[in-house]
């Protein structure tokens, strides 16, 4: 295909649409939802690691006796429930932001 000349791609945006977004005070407050979601996700992953190690090592994490502080049933329950909570919080944040976008927060 050396003899075929290609034209420049058409249909790409000339400007970034995010330059047109006006962040309202209510949208800025939803940043806290994002931080809470990240904290719950990190906690869920950490508890998943502890729970997995309980299954492998018995009642410890790399030799540390964590079962004295966090029994297996507690880490497994918190791991599962945090998944539900961070997904719900992320959904709530998404709904709050998308309502603003659909209500005309993006100005042309």
Image (cartoon, rainbow, N blue to C red):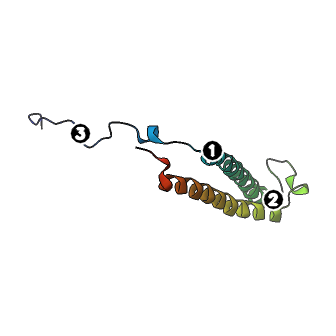
Which residue is located at x 75 percent, y 54 percent? Answer: 47
Element under label 1?
A: helix
Quarter of the image where the N terminus is located: top left
Percent coordinates x, y for residue 14 in the rendering: 32, 36
Q: Residue furthest left?
A: 3
Q: Is residue 44 left or right of residue 64?
A: left
Residue 25 is tagged as: 1
Q: What whole-number distance in Å separates the C-alpha atoms at marks 1 and 2?
A: 50 Å
Which of the numbered marks, if any, corresponds to residue 9?
Answer: 3
Label 3 or label 2, whichever lies nearer to me, is: 3
> Closer to the N terminus: mark 1 or mark 3?
3
Q: Nearer the viewer, mark 1 or mark 3?
A: 1
Q: Residue at x 83, y 48 (%)?
A: 63
Query: Mark 2 — residue?
Result: 58
Point out the tag, 1 or 2, that comes first from the N-terminus: 1
- Nearer-N-terminus badge (3/2): 3
Q: CA distance from mark 1 to mark 3?
A: 38 Å
């Amino acid at each position: 295909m050396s003899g075929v000349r290609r034209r420049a791609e058409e249909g790409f945006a000339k400007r970034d649409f995010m330059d047109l977004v006006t962040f309202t005070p209510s949208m800025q407050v939803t940043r806290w939802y994002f931080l809470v979601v990240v904290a719950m996700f990190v906690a869920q992953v950490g508890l998943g690691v502890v729970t997995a190690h309980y299954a492998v090592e018995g009642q410890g994490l790399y030799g540390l006796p964590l079962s004295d502080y966090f029994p297996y049933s507690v880490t497994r329950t918190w791991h599962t429930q945090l998944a539900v909570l961070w997904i719900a919080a992320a959904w709530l944040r998404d709904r709050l932001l998308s309502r603003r976008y659909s209500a005309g927060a993006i100005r042309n």
